[in-house]
């Protein structure tokens, strides 16, 4: 397979033609392109490969999203509320990468506190898609747009992002790279600034699935610092379930070398054929199904009836959790305290907090906090929050029904399911269309941008793994295909994605 080609907005002749990005290559790309793309907001200059480091990621360059605690830069979350905050500890995922030999080259731009789909709500200014031209700037997606743009333009080999409702997969699709969101709890969230605690996952972005697999191996480890991280016993249970599948344990034959995914059943969920789906996205969906069929997969149609309700349910739950999580940024416990001339005359502490939050938090963050506070109020709780939780549970049940592998959270042994009605993975587009133009926050109705997440939020609601794989260009802009699998079935997902990318 030819290398993924990422055009830099400086010159459409500037391309990234290899998956390996050494420290020297990364530093050169940063000098050449970062001032225009604005992917990295802090860059380290004292990186050195230790002669004693022998990890399997030795010398790999990594960009870290600005909502992950590191020692290399402030954990700012692209917000005035945390712009000078230096974390007293480092995120578990970052520590694991460093232990494996990776080099942290800088922190990546993002939507403030992860709230956005275009990387435009940032105190550092918007990030631009590396596929932008000299005439038109396109969005890299969000909220991990800085991480995606850094990988696509060769500033690093891999990057870490956070995925609450598609914030890794959507930027990956729009920047023409691979974006992986693992099962909820696979990667420790210790050191990740929370947005929606029951939805957040740390994800990985790279130009190849193989790089994703190697990085995932390093950071998908148990962590007692995170109570939501998978325990070692649960990981062992999942491994036992996945190994018990007969079609995986069969030895390779000469016929299977040409059809490496022989026996895998791929489901095409009808409910993802939404009105917003463009003709281009629909075509790459069909092409992707044909490619999997050539690899030996059986393609079947499946139904997930509650998928149309996932977007409103997601935003109800995510904003409710954000309202709670962001309450700590009051200028006393966390956050930069913003003082006003008349602060001394304010009658109580809550009004002083209000001054700090008004000046420290952006308009989109304030909007989501207010909406989240409302849905958790006594008047709205029964009408919005509880029905959204019921929808979430129904979606989880539907995914469990269509996947052949049982959910390890509820079963320790392989259940006998009717093979003709179940699948091993699902295939659907990552986005409804190619990247939109990058505008300022005031140029677009904020609510209309929420529709960008319609294809990605179901995986977060169910906690299942999902990956976006680049699937071609339309009018010079990338599109991505998305694969999803049962909770814990991350290795199968990466295996299928690898074969798609190498055909």
Image (cartoon, rainbow, N blue to C red):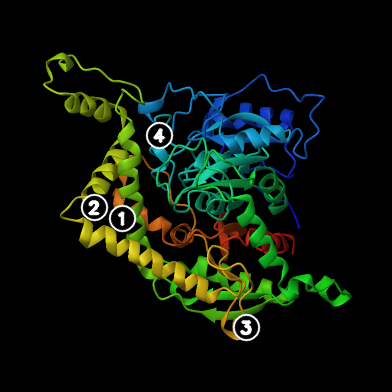
First-in-chain label (4 vs 1)? 4
Label 4 residue SS: loop
Q: Nearer the viewer, mark 4 or mark 1?
A: 1
Residue drawn at point x = 34 percent, y = 66 percent: 390
What secondary structure is marked by label 2?
Answer: helix
Residue 407: percent from left, percent from top: 56, 67
Circle nearer the N terminus (2, 1): 1
User: How dense is the environment of label 2, judged by Cα within 10 Å: few (below 14), some, or many (20 and up)?
Assistant: many
Q: Residues within 10 Å of mark 4 (few under 14, many from 20)?
A: many
Q: Residue at x 47, y 48 (%)?
A: 200
> Residue at the right extreme?
254
Relative image position of residue 257 (x, y in whole percent)? 83, 71
How many numbered marks appear?
Answer: 4
* C-alpha separation, residue under disc 4 versus residue under disc 1: 23 Å
Task: Decide which of 246, 470 is in the foreground and name it.
Answer: 246
Residue bearing mark 2 = 375
Q: In the drawing, what numbered circle is on residue 122?
A: 4
Spatial CA distance of label 4 from label 3 is 48 Å
SS type, badge 1: helix
| Circle 3 residue | 419
Q: CA distance from mark 1 to mark 3?
A: 35 Å
Which residue bears the numbered disc 1?
Answer: 316
């Amino acid at each position: 397979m030819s290398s993924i080609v990422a055009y830099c907005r400086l010159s459409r002749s500037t391309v990234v033609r290899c998956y390996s990005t050494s420290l020297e290559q990364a530093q050169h790309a940063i000098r050449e392109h970062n001032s225009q793309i604005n992917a990295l907001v802090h860059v380290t200059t004292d990186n050195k490969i230790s002669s004693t480091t022998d990890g399997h990621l030795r010398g790999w360059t990594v960009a870290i999203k600005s909502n992950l605690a590191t020692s290399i830069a402030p954990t700012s979350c692209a917000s005035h509320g945390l712009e000078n905050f230096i974390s007293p500890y480092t995120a578990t995922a970052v520590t694991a990468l460093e232990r494996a030999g990776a080099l942290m080259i800088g922190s990546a731009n993002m939507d403030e506190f992860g709230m956005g789909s275009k990387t435009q709500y940032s105190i550092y200014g918007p990030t631009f898609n590396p596929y932008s031209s000299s005439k038109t700037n396109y969005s890299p997606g969000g909220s991990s747009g800085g991480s995606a743009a850094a990988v696509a333009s060769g500033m690093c080999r891999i990057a870490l992002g956070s995925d609450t409702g598609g914030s890794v997969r959507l930027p990956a699709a729009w920047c023409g790279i691979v974006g992986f969101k693992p099962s909820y709890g696979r990667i420790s969230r210790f050191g990740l600034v929370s947005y929606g605690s029951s939805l957040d996952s740390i994800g990985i972005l790279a130009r190849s699935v193989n790089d994703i697999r190697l990085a995932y191996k390093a950071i998908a480890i148990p962590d007692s610092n995170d109570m939501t991280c998978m325990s070692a016993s649960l990981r062992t249970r999942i491994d036992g379930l996945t190994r018990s599948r007969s079609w995986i344990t069969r030895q390779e034959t000469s016929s299977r070398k040409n059809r490496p995914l022989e026996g895998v059943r791929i489901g095409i969920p009808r409910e993802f054929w939404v009105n917003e789906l463009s003709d281009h996205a629909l075509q790459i969906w069909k092409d992707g199904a044909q490619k999997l069929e050539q690899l030996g997969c059986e393609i079947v149609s499946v139904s997930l009836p509650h998928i149309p309700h996932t977007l409103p349910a997601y935003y109800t739950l995510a904003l409710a959790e954000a309202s709670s999580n962001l309450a700590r940024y009051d200028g006393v416990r966390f956050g930069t305290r913003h003082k006003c001339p008349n602060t001394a005359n304010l009658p109580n502490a809550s009004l002083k907090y209000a001054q700090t939050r008004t000046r420290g938090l952006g308009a989109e963050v304030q909007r989501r906090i207010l909406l989240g506070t409302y849905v958790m109020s006594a008047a709205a709780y029964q009408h919005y929050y509880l029905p959204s939780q019921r929808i979430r549970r129904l979606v989880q049940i539907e995914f469990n029904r269509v996947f052949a592998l049982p959910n390890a959270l509820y079963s320790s042994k392989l259940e006998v399911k009717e093979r003709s009605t179940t699948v091993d993975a699902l295939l659907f587009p990552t986005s409804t269309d190619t990247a939109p133009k990058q505008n300022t926050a005031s140029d677009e109705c904020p609510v209309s941008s929420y529709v960008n997440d319609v294809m990605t939020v179901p995986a977060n609601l169910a906690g299942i793994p999902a990956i976006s794989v680049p699937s071609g260009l339309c009018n010079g802009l990338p599109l991505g295909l998305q694969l999803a699998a049962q909770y814990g079935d991350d290795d199968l997902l990466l295996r299928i994605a690898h074969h798609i990318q190498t055909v």
